[in-house]
Amino acid sequence: MDPKTSADPFRPSRADRFSFGLWTVGNPGRDPFGEATRARLDPNHIVRKLAECGAWGVNLHDNDLVPFGASATDRDRIVAEFKATLEDCGMVVPMATTNLFTHPVFKDGAFTSNDARVRAFAVQKTMAAIDLGVELGARTHVFWGGREGTEADACRDPRDGLKRFRDALNILTGYVRDQGYDLRFALEAKPNEPRGDIYLSTTGHMLHFIETLDDAEMVGVNPEVAHETMAGLSFVHGVAQAMDAGKLFHIDLNAQRIGRYDQDLRFGSEDMKQAFLLVRLLEGVNGYAAYDGPLHFDAHAYRTEDEAGVWEFAVGCMRTYKILAARARAFDADPDVREILDTESDAEAERLVSGGFDAERVRELRARTFDPDALAAPGLRYERLDQLMTEHLLGVRG
Ligand code: DIG
Ligand code: MN
Ligand code: MN
C-alpha cells in the first residue's frame, strides 16, 4: 500500500516516537573498502526529509552538526539554523551523543586512553556535547565507547580502563547535576569494532558497571540489536533484563546477521522472528508495561542506494516496526495462542516458591513429595505455539 495515503495503518507518524541519527540517513555509503557512494546530506535537509517520512525525532553526535574545531561563532550560527529547522518541521531532538571515535586523538581510546591529556580532552569535549544536546532539547545522552578497548591487551590493565571510564562518567554525572540539566545517560555496549575488543562489551556488563558509579540513578543503557547479536546473544533477553532493572533509557534498533561486522541494517531486514519478539516486548506484553522511550533506528541504507533509497530505508524501518506491532497484538489475541499461554499454574507450588524466604514455607516445601516422572510426562505444545507465531508472521493468521 502506498505509505503516503492516510488510510495506510502502517504509515509512520509523530505519535510513534520514531527517531534517526543524523549519521544514519546521512551515511554516505563509505566502507573500509570503498569511497562514499552518496553525497553528504545537509543536517537541515535531513530534518526536513525525516519529517516528511513521518519520523518524530532526530539525534546527533556533536560533530554531525558542528564540525570538529569549529569556532564558537560558527557553532552558534549552525545551531541556530538547526533549531529553526526543527521548529519549522515540528521535529525534536530526543538524544545527543559525543563523537569520541573519529579524530585520531582517540586512536587509543577517549575516556580510557593511557594519555591523561586525551582523557581530559574527551571529558571536556563531552561536556560541550552535553551542553549542545541540552540546548537542542535532548533528555538522553548516549555513551558508545567505540575506541575504549584494545588490540595489544598488555597496553593497560583492563581494570585501569574500567576505572578511567568510571572516573569520566562520575565527573560528567556531577557536571549534569551541577548544571541542573534534566538529562540521563545511556551506555551503549559493543563487543568489538573498531577496536579488537571493546571494554564493557555487552548490555549485561553495562548493567553491572552502572551500579559502581557515584550516580547510578542517572545512568541506564542503550542496547543495540546489532551489537548484542555480534556477541552471539539474545537481544530480546538483554533488553528484557534492562527493563527489569528499570534501565532501558534508550534503544538502537537495526538488524544484523550473526558472525559479521556491525552491519546496522534496516530494522527487521534479517532475523524477523527476533524482531517480532523484540517489538512485542517493547510494546508491552504478559502484563508488563511498554517501553515509552524513543524508538531510535541506528542503521543505514545499503551502500548501493542513492538518496531516494535512503528514504525508502527510513520508511521501511518504521513501517516494519508498526507491522510487527500489529502482528504481535494479533498473535497475543489469538485464542489458539491463549489456550497454550494461559495454562493454569499450580497455585500451591507457586505459593511455595514465590515471595522470598519464609521459614514456614520452607518447612512445607521440604515436607512436600514430588513425582518427577509425572511432572516430566506432558508435552508443552511449544511446537504448536511457535508454528502459530510463524503463521502470524507469514500473514496467514489473524
Ligand atoms: C554506534 O552504534 C553508536 C554511535 O553511532 C552512536 O554513538 C551511538 C548512538 O546511537 N550508537
Ligand atoms: Mn552498530
Ligand atoms: Mn548504536
Image (cartoon, rainbow, N blue to C red):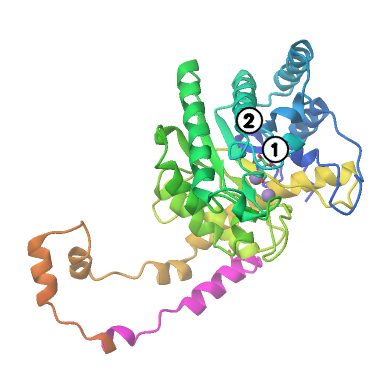
Specify the quadrant that holds the C terminus. bottom right
* Closest to the observer, 98 or 181: 98
Residue 335's disc is none
SS type, badge 1: helix
Question: Relative to 23, does residue 273 appear above or below in the rendering?
Answer: below
Against 221, residue 140 (above or below) is above
Q: Main secondary structure of the magenta part?
A: helix
Mark 2–mark 1 CB contact (< 8 Å): yes
> What is the quadrant of residue 378 in the picture?
bottom left
Q: Which residues are magenta?
A: 374-396
Q: Which residue is mark 1?
A: 106
Say if residue 249 shows up in the picture.
no
Asked whether the viewer can see residue 285, the reply is yes
Which residue position holds label 2?
Answer: 122
Which residue is at 68% across, 26% downward?
91
Q: Residue at x 67, y 35 (%)?
A: 100
Q: Quadrant of ligand 1?
A: top right
| Amino acid type shown at disc 1 | Phe
Q: Residue 291: give x, y in percent of width and height.
A: 49, 44
Mark 2 secondary-structure assignment: helix
